[in-house]
């Protein structure tokens, strides 16, 4: 005769149910460990009309807002918490800015660390979000390196070659993904091209096209300029490298300068002089140019970014894909969402729900945005299509995607405002930022 096992079965079901509830509760409590869940969050009470996809909007730390600045949290009906820092474009006391981690391309830094550096320099950041894509580390000693455009205070710090890879800007309308601000305050959103040329003064008529600034030199990107902003050395292997001195620094979007070649290195990994640059050429092409670019040879370096308005941009930062154009979801993003990533295989990560970061703007405001994710019971994140749709519902006219995942961080008013996926603030490559305007620039 068989023994009755029903009580054991019921106990097993009960234990499984309790474990599931425990997981959901921990996910919710983990998110609410953030100070902004406990302090300074009040329900929005103004008369703004919210989209039907918003369950609730909280005003965070409203007692510390500056004129023209707001910090909000939206509870999206799809199951995500969306943090938004807003800046009125007409606010004379505020400005958009960017900051490079550790003041150089190599290595990374948390937003909290970078803002402490800025405060010591009498800069007052109000909010910042992680910006560009890059590599966290590799076997060549690069402990972090931007893959996108970076222009800071008019200096052309980084610009890549256009590639259809995750993190890069693909050569299509969907890939017009660099945001820039001109001296008169115009906001730009375009795919920016370098148009760099090197001409030698040795009687030859040949012109060498420069593919990128402070990027990886290889067969895909064969000619790269390394400036002191990259780091101490180029970290290349077997590249033909030429040290150029007596050259004007920094590089800018509209640039022309003479130079003198002071050193030639056929093995790569050259030291980057503080008063010069290193021209790196991948081995196959480098052999062809070695005789034309030789020690003590003079020449001229020219740069002219396109579109032309970018030649005067003071602050510029790149992402990888455009989300919203003229108030509507980018057409290629619609197709991407419907195909669940099938129309852009290299970017299929964007068809799944993950933490996200982005930048958007309309005629009145600039928005820095982070979507929390990977946290059951609190926030599961968004796909790129969901994010673009939600932004358009909020009245955002143009938007681009920044690096996401566990890097997604919105720092605001002295602390991390959101709940990063790993439970801690990850080091990132650069920061898109809202800050108080310098008195002398008003």
Image: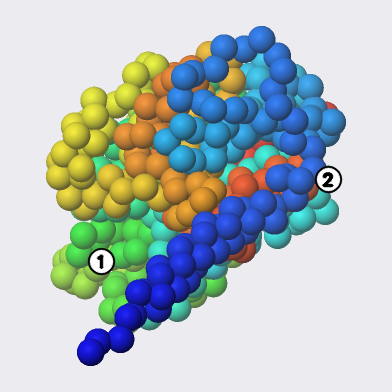
State the residue at coordinates (66%, 10%): 47
How far across and how far down the image is residue 65, in percent?
A: 79, 30
The residue positioned farthest toward the bottom in the image shown: 1
Q: Residue at x 75, y 50 (%)?
A: 35
Q: Which mark is residue 55?
A: none
Query: Disc 2 and disc 1: Cα gap in Å?
Result: 40 Å
Bin the neighbour count of mark 2 within 10 Å (Cα to Cα): few under 14, some 14-19, many 20 and up: few
Q: Locate residue 119 relative to residue 83 in the image: left or right.
A: right
Whether residue 283 appears in this view of the structure is yes
Q: Which residue is drawn at the image coordinates 16% and 39% (left, top)?
A: 339
Residue 290 higher or lower than 428, as above or below: below
Q: Is residue 225 left or right of residue 334?
A: right
Q: Which structural element holds mark 1? A: loop
Residue 259, picture quadrant: bottom left
Q: Position of residue 14 (x, y in %)?
A: 46, 67
Q: Position of residue 395 (x, y in %)?
A: 48, 17
Specify whether residue 168 is in view.
no
Residue named by callout 1:
218
Residue that appears at 40% across and 70% down: 10
In the rendered view of the protein, which quadrant contains the N terminus? bottom left
Q: Which residue is mark 2?
A: 122
């Amino acid at each position: 005769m068989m023994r009755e096992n029903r009580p054991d079965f019921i106990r097993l079901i009960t234990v499984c149910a309790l474990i599931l509830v425990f997981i959901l509760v921990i996910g919710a409590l983990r998110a609410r460990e953030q100070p902004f869940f406990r302090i300074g969050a009040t329900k929005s009470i103004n008369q703004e009309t919210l989209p039907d996809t918003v369950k609730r909007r909280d005003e965070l730390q409203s007692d510390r807002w500056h004129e023209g600045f707001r910090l909000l949290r939206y509870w999206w009906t799809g199951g995500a918490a969306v943090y938004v820092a807003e800046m009125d474009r007409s606010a004379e006391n505020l400005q958009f800015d960017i900051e490079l981690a550790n003041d150089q391309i190599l290595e990374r830094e948390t937003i909290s660390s970078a803002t402490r550096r800025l405060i010591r320099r009498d800069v007052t950041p109000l909010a910042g979000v992680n910006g560009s894509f890059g590599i966290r580390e590799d076997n060549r000693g690069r402990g972090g390196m931007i893959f996108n455009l970076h222009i800071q205070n008019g200096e052309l710090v980084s610009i890549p070659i256009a590639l259809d890879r995750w993190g890069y800007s693909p050569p299509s309308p969907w890939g017009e993904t660099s945001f820039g601000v001109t001296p008169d305050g115009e906001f730009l959103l375009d795919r920016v091209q370098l148009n760099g040329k090197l001409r030698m003064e040795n009687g030859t008529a040949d012109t060498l096209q420069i593919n990128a600034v402070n990027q990886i030199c290889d067969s895909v990107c064969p000619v790269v300029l390394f400036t002191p902003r990259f780091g101490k050395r180029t970290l290349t292997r077997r590249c033909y490298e030429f040290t150029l001195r007596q050259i004007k620094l920094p590089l800018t979007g509209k640039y022309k300068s003479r130079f003198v070649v002071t050193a030639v290195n056929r093995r790569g990994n050259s030291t980057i002089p503080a008063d010069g640059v290193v021209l790196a050429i991948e081995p196959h092409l480098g052999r062809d140019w070695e005789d034309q670019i030789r020690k003590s040879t003079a020449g001229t370096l020219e740069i002219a970014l396109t579109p032309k308005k970018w030649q005067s941009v003071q602050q510029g930062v790149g992402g990888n894909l455009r989300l919203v154009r003229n108030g509507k979801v980018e057409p290629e993003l619609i197709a991407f969402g419907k195909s669940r990533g099938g129309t852009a295989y290299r970017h299929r990560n964007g068809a799944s729900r993950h933490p996200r970061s982005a930048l958007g703007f309309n005629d009145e405001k600039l928005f820095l945005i982070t979507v929390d994710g990977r946290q059951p019971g609190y926030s599961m994140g968004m796909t790129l299509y969901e994010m673009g749709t939600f932004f358009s519902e909020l009245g955002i006219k143009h938007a681009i995607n920044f690096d996401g995942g566990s890097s997604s961080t919105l720092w605001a008013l002295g602390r991390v405002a959101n709940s990063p996926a790993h439970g801690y603030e990850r080091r990132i490559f650069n920061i898109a930022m809202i800050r108080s305007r310098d008195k002398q620039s008003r």
